[in-house]
Image (cartoon, rainbow, N blue to C red):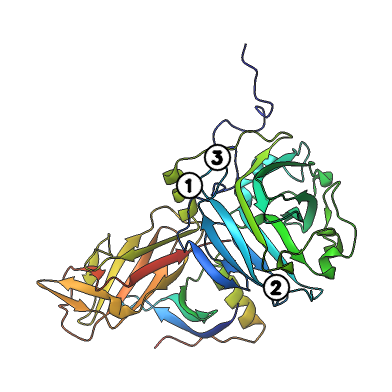
Amino acid sequence: MIITNGQYVTDLISGNNISIKATIDGETLFVPIDSANRHYAEILRQVDAGTLTIADAD
Amino acid sequence: MTKARTNASASPAVGRNMVINGAMNVAQRSASVTGIGTDGYYTLDRWHINMGTTSAGRLTMSQTADGPNNISANCLKLDCTTVDTSIAAGEFILLSQRFEGQNLQRIGKGVVGAKQVTVSFYVKANAAFTFGLELYDNDNSRQISKLFATTTDWVRHEITFPADVDNGSSPFDDDNANSLNLQFWLHAGSTFTGGTLNTASWANDSSANRAPGIDSFFSSTDNNFFITGVQFEVGPVATEFEQEDFGVTLAKCQRYYHSNTFATGKTVSAGGAVNSTTIAVNAGMPHPVIMRASPTGSVSDGTHFAVRHRTVATVCTSVSLGSDPRSTYFQGNVSSGLTLGDGCFCRSADDACTLAFDAEL
């Protein structure tokens, strides 16, 4: 997967991170913070490898 | 006297087929996608295209109304649109279905009493080819492969694989993760064809032994591959293909993926929605079934959504999603005009309003 532009999305009410908005293989997706999700697992792998960083929410 | 089914002790009369959408009837994403050259889920639900090292070859994957009589009206068709006759070592094409370990416990793999399994399927092609069928244990990196042949007419293949007792050391995990790939090898480089086909018994993964002897689907743009009626069951006998209502199959598929395209003015938020600020709305959207895991959300641009509040509808400027297996938390942003704390609902602003959720393996 080619993943770019990762950024956390926060819940307006609680302020908690609820997903990561990222461009994956050219498509904008909202990836849940759940290690059983294949996109999140790949984000974790690329972050651990130092090839991807996730920006804080706006 | 009625004879008992041969697999009666192993497979139930209903629900014996562990493959989902084996009749190729559900295609939520698209009926046809062209130019496929990378991994992904493209058309028919649950059926994954897996490709290794980048190949020059390209294919079209489609749901085609050309199934064998009395089995299915539909089949999955692959059509080679760009050849690749210079096959790099690491290339491959796999047409696969991936299974949760918790749905495979009936096999008892890797423990005492492990059972044989049988895969059956209807297949045809534009010519005679030899391709491979592999069961790959993703938990323990073990596999076994068999070859099968195509003709230009529909043929049902029935292929039984031996039990894998493996001294009790390689059971499938009893969870919602990917434990097994049932996959058809249609093209492969020497990394996967250079050895001897591992066909007699399950063995630890040795790449060179996974696909020796197969032909290449990418050898000519004349090549087509058709498959349907895929069944995977416990026992040494292929029983009749298990027919299933469309709605049942659709619900099974929705555990892994579901999508909606809304016509203009249709309600998007089935759950409650509230204006959480004067420029933002939060809404709950239940999934049609509990999904395998929290799904990835895909959504059309926010301007395709509107917030219906009091007597007006205000088009969103952007939207975002946060999901769990049961529901999605939708946030829609507008430029102004909402009343804090008011109830509201979300609807489509035009007919390009889409939502999709993916919890595939």
Q: Of marks 1 and 3, which one's residue comes earlier in the chain?
A: 3
Q: Quadrant of the C terminus of chain B?
A: bottom right
Circle 1 is placed at which residue position? B249
Question: With respect to residue B350, does B206 lie above or below?
Answer: above
Q: Which mark is residue B209?
A: none
From the top left corner, tell me how far across and down residue B292 is, in percent: 51, 56
Considering depth in this image, is B329 or B157 the residue closer to the camera?
B157
Circle 3 is placed at which residue position? B69
Q: Amino acid at mark 3?
A: Asn
Circle 2 is placed at which residue position? B83
From the top left corner, tell me how far across and down residue B183 is, in percent: 69, 56
Other-residue count near label 2 (Cα within 10 Å), few / some / many at <14 / 14–19 / ≥20:
some
Q: Amino acid at mark 1?
A: Thr
List the single residue furthest toward the left.
Answer: B311
A39 lies left or right of B195: left
Q: Quadrant of the N terminus of chain B?
A: top right
Considering depth in this image, is B346 or B189 the residue closer to the camera?
B189
Considering depth in this image, is B254 or B122 the residue closer to the camera?
B122
From the top left corner, tell me how far across and down residue B101 is, in percent: 64, 51
Mark 2–mark 3 Cα distance, whole angstroms, equals: 32 Å
- Same chain assignment for discs 1 and 2: yes
